[in-house]
Image (cartoon, coloured by chain):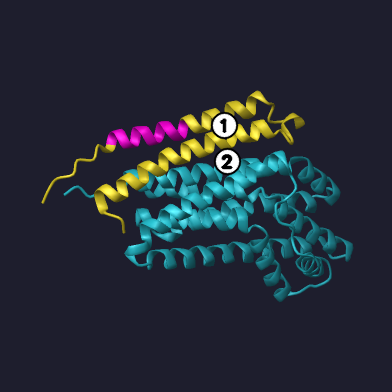
Chain colours: A yellow, B cyan
Amino acid sequence: MGTIFVDLTTLQLVGIKTIVGGFVTIGLILLFNGISKNSTKGSFPIFLLLCGVITFSTLILLTLAINTVVLTRGWQ
Amino acid sequence: MNQVSLAVIGLTMGLAVGFNPTLISIISIYMASMIGRQTKKQYYTLAGLFLLIVFALLVLLIAGLLTTILSNLSLIYSDSINLLIAILGVITGTSLVRRYFWPKPLMNVPDSLKKALNYRTTKKTGIFNILYLALFLFFASLNTVGITLLLLSSYNVTLSSSVVVWSLPFAIGLIIPLYFIIVVITLGNKVSVVIAWKENNKNTMRLCSGLIIILLSWLQLLIIATGEIIVS
């Protein structure tokens, strides 16, 4: 039986950094545009930017999750 | 992640999705109709509280059902289902964030449902009506309460925890903002003031719910990525 080494700390670090980074970016975008004002209503570029950040972070986390599932447990 | 963290997540999520414009509307209209019918103050306060308790029990029941279904799923599908639930959470969260920018919903509520809800809220009384209303409350908040329950049930299965640990704090957190609305109305504030406050803040409430659902989905992906790793 071969041994699979999974560096859990690195995975956790990348995952946590992705979540924190994603949320800080979303927060900054909303803050920059005035969260309490109506200035962002209907703003397509801002929404597109938020979607980009959400998709990017989701894809990184999804890759980590799929990687773990496939490497350590096999696809169940 | 220990049981205390799961309970705190449950309570936070309950509070976050409890500030739901649709739920606040239904509760406010129900209270307004009771006041309009000259019902005594203690009766309409009790009726509102009873409605919230029935709603919380319904949420607990559905949490238990979802957890049972997910934990009894065949192992062949468990990983795929957990990943799909996380992706569904991100999509639902993004659609809620969209409504901060464009409040118009992607799908309109059918007129028949609106009429039924109006009938149940303003015309009917009694215990069975409260059961119907609790079901309507759950159906109306399916995109926030429903998806959060699904995500938390998925957490529960991944972390092999007890369902009560998170579902009870979630149900309590969910009804706290709604109970606050009942108290505000009982204290003599006009329902129109509550409705106006809800109208002014509904997009921000949706934005917060959306972002928190996205955060929960990301945490679910992180748990799948780092938890329960078997090295052989």
Look at mark 2 in the image and give the residue it sits on: B211
Q: Residue furthest top?
A: A32
Q: Amino acid at mark 1?
A: Ile
Chain letter belonging to callout 2: B
Nearer to me, B49 or B82: B82
Q: Position of residue A71 (x, y in %)?
A: 26, 47
User: Against B84, is A7 above or below?
Assistant: above
User: Against B150, is B101 above or below?
Assistant: above
Judge whether residue A11 is colored magenta: yes
**Around disc 2, counting alpha carbons within 10 Å, would you say few (fewer than 14), some (14 to 19), or many (20 or more)?**
many
At x 36%, y 56%, the residue is B79
In what element is the residue under mark 1?
helix
Q: Which of the labelled discs sits on residue B210, or is there none?
A: none
At x 32%, y 43%, the residue is B226
Chain letter belonging to callout 1: A
Judge whether residue B203 is colored magenta: no
**Around disc 1, counting alpha carbons within 10 Å, would you say few (fewer than 14), some (14 to 19), or many (20 or more)?**
some
Q: Position of residue B66 (x, y in %)?
A: 48, 64
- Which range of residues does the magenta coloring cover? A9-20
Q: Residue furthest left?
A: A1
User: CB under 8 Å between callouts 1 and 2?
Assistant: yes
Asked which quadrant contains residue B94, the reply is top right
At x 27%, y 54%, the residue is A74
Nearer to me, B32 or B138: B138
Q: Which of the labelled discs sits on residue A26, or is there none?
A: 1
Q: Position of residue B96 (x, y in %)?
A: 64, 46
Q: Amino acid at mark 2?
A: Leu
At x 54%, y 28%, the residue is A25
